[in-house]
Amino acid sequence: MATEDKNRATAAAILPLVGGAANVSSIAHCMTRLRLGLHDRSLVQDDALKAVPAVMGVVEDDTYQIVLGPGTVARVTPEFEKLVEEGKQEAPAPAPAPAGAAPLTAEELAAQGAEMRAARKAKNATPFKLFLRKIANIFVPLIPALIGCGIIAGLNGLLVNLEWLPSVTPALAAMASGFMALIAVFVGYNTAKEFGGTPILGGAVAAIIVFPGVANIEAFGQKLSPGQGGVLGALGAAVLAVYVEKWCRRWVPEALDVLVTPTLTVLISGLVTIFGLMYVAGEVSTAIGDFADWLLSNGGAGAGLILGGFFLPLVMLGLHQALIPIHTTLIEQQGYTVLLPILAMAGAGQVGAAIATYFRLPRNESIRKTIKSALPAGFLGVGEPLIYGVSLPLGRPFITACVGGAFGGAFVGFFNQLGDAVGSTAIGPSGWALFPLLDGNHGLGATIAIYAGGLVVGYVAGFLATYFFGFSGELLAEFNVSQEEDAPAGAATPAPATAAQKAPASV
């Protein structure tokens, strides 16, 4: 009961600071963030929102995103939805910010990071990136099921290898495989919903792909296989269904709409899917898998260096969303994605950079406090508080964090080149949280050892790069200051220097 009260209290604290129930147009959540659609962004009280104890930070994208962390966000969101529903009629005015409360240095630093993120997003809100966000919105709701089924699959594999509980392992295999066998249907449903069609029609067309009866159909001179084309085929089929449905809505008389539109939507989209999309998407899916294997088998350390080093900038620009269908395709084909463990090294470099920042700024109590509170989440793969609260607004530490990720990625990529594939059975987690989802081709022990070694390399490289190259003399003079040292005798203690006030002009 106390936990429910805490989650409801967090939701109640957030609601007035985002403009109240009347200002909320949509509510969703991913692994770590409460994602809100807002009617009027100006009603949001950013500083007061960041001061809410459960809030780790905020990110402004196509939606307003409040970072609450894994587990917490899944519990707070239902309470928030209830409060919004209860308050829609009252539409309370936004609560005023606490009077006389001076923001802490850590909060101002986080604000600077969020502002930099928002500025980049506003500048780069191109049609291509908006399309990638739509793709992400299709797959993000599937992540909890991917994680749960992935962990069960790992547990089942362990029990099979140890020859334990033989009467239970078939049941675990069914639990782990059931979702993946029908993932195309869920992708089709979410795709139609995201592109403005009827979700169940998108799911119905996508279900054709996994229907066993397609094995009796011949297209392009060969028999089709159930599941051929996978999630890419499902995505394409559902998008086509949306356009067919919208075309029907324009031309079919209203009296016949309920009969004709669904029929034509499934019929036309289904025929194109069976005699075109399944084959094409199957070829593309196979090519993606072959290319990933070729890249790591031949490029190994070099490919890992590039992937691990550039992943944080990709996240900043929103381009990482293009990788979600690729991860899902690899999991569907091979049982795991070999890309995610390499990309996860970016988080390791960020953790190493944060620890180095802690030691390089011994007098800045506020930033050190932020680092101490955010490091546990960072080790578990939740990097937003460290990225947007520490390294990004400081400048150089963000670059040296990327260096750490590059070295960690090169380590994992090198072993892939030697033939030791390290993969993840689900997408979403990284850092230590990825351990239960690891899989590979040379036994679980070797896979865990390689991934753990990559994390250590990322931590150490990020730390060393940041400690020795992450701070210029000017940057240290700006930020390595103590609140007590700056306060004149008898005067009120001022807040220490902040990145918002003294952000370097360049890195």
Image (cartoon, rainbow, N blue to C red):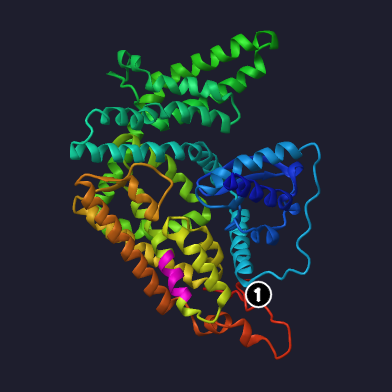
Q: Amino acid at mark 1?
A: Gln
Residue 179 in percent (x, y) is at: 39, 30
Residue 426 in percent (x, y) is at: 38, 42
Residue drawn at (38%, 62%), measured in percent from left and top?
405
Magenta-drawn segment: 351-358
Residue drawn at (52%, 65%), measured in percent from left and top?
373
Q: Is residue 407 visible?
A: no
Quarter of image, res 381: bottom left
Q: Main secondary structure of the magenta part?
A: helix
Q: As displayed, is residue 33 above or below residue 404?
A: above
- Check residue 176 for magenta coloring: no
Q: Is residue 326 visible?
A: yes
Quarter of image, res 147: top left
The quadrant in which the N terminus is found is: top right
Whether residue 11 sits left or right of residue 325 in the image: it is right
Residue placed most toward the observer, 446 or 116: 446
Which residue carries the number 1 mark?
A: 501
Residue 39 in percent (x, y) is at: 73, 44
- Check residue 354 for magenta coloring: yes
Residue placed most toward the observer, 245 or 189: 189
Estimate how packed mark 1 is, as few (under 14), some (14 to 19) or many (20 or more) residues with alpha carbons within 10 Å: few
